[in-house]
Amino acid sequence: MILVVGSANLDFVVRAPHIPAPGETVLGQTFATYPGGKGANQAVACARAGGADTHMLVALGQDSHAEPLLASLNAANVQVKCVLSPDLSTGCAFICVADNAENAITVAPGANLSLMPEHLPDLNGYSHLLMQLETPLPAVSAYALAARQQGVKVVLNAAPAQCLPPELLAAVDVLVVNEGELATLVPHPMSLVTNLAQLPVPCVVVTLGQRGCMARLGNNFFVQAAYPVAAVDTTGAGDTFCGVLVAAMDRGEPLAVAMRHASAAAALACTMPGAQSSIPNATDVQAFLAAQETSDTALDTLRAYCGLS
């Protein structure tokens, strides 16, 4: 059983030919709203794509923006533990999605900032605690320390990028980052192999976009090439990866298998618009995996990029 603690945002999404540069106005194409937020996205991915028994601690405002977020979590069979914040609005994100499927995101955290250390529920029965950094850092640190004391594995997706206090890193069992976030945490960035070795965490997973992902578990390194798809919208792909990775760990899968499942789910998430709306179900992930083959050339290229060859 997994507890996800984190953010929930209503995403306001505009598609455009390209992401605007500073001072530039771009004429958009379509507009839609979608349930999002890193925490809620990862909870939905745990439950829907990963098939895990998933609970979520989330803070919402008492406004209409909260309704579609709760509806999406409930539809994915996520058990919600909600902190209502009467003085703050539900979190929102403003997203521009370019024709090449890349995105730019600005978040107004709102009620997400009201999560406090005392809101953490009893951790009895949970195997993993999954968190991100769109909620207050002191609360994230307090939750991680409480979980460590109770024998619950702590998984931290260190996004958005920021420096982390040593006591938080010391309580993390699995750290998930992208390349930019990894560079924020490593004082003198070098090769990916060297960067991962510098982090005082038992397991580090770094996502590499269309290249794939790499992980260090102890002194062992693993790589997983990305599965090629016709990308429509990359929003939520990283969150899908995190959620499915933890769901596989909850089932007791080896890290290499967890990375493969997470990569497949993330690839499928890129083929649909929106964040939670793009997350596939577990059956689709299994069917997709069954049809995939990874070439030796792709793996050799990835190993060379990571500094493993």
Image (tube, rainbow, N blue to C red):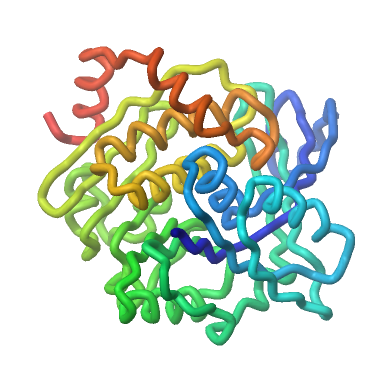
Looking at the image, the residue that sits furthest to the bottom is 118
Instruction: Name the residue rendered at 51%, 41% in the picture.
Output: 240
Horizontal side of residue 256 vs 108, given as left or right: left
Instruction: Name the residue rendered at 67%, 58% in the picture.
Output: 8
Locate residue 223, reporting x and y percent: 24, 33
Instruction: Name the residue rendered at 44%, 56% in the picture.
Output: 157
Locate residue 237, reporting x and y percent: 53, 37
Between 280 and 92, which is closer to the camera in this rendering? 280
Locate residue 215, reporting x and y percent: 25, 44
- The quadrant the N terminus occupies is bottom left
Between 23 and 154, which is closer to the camera in this rendering? 154
Locate residue 190, reporting x and y percent: 22, 47
Please tell me in which quadrant of the rendered image residue 64 appears.
Answer: bottom right
Horizontal side of residue 293 vs 135, given as left or right: left
Horizontal side of residue 28 vs 219, given as left or right: right
- The quadrant the C terminus occupies is top left
Q: Where is 47 relative to 65, above or below?
A: above
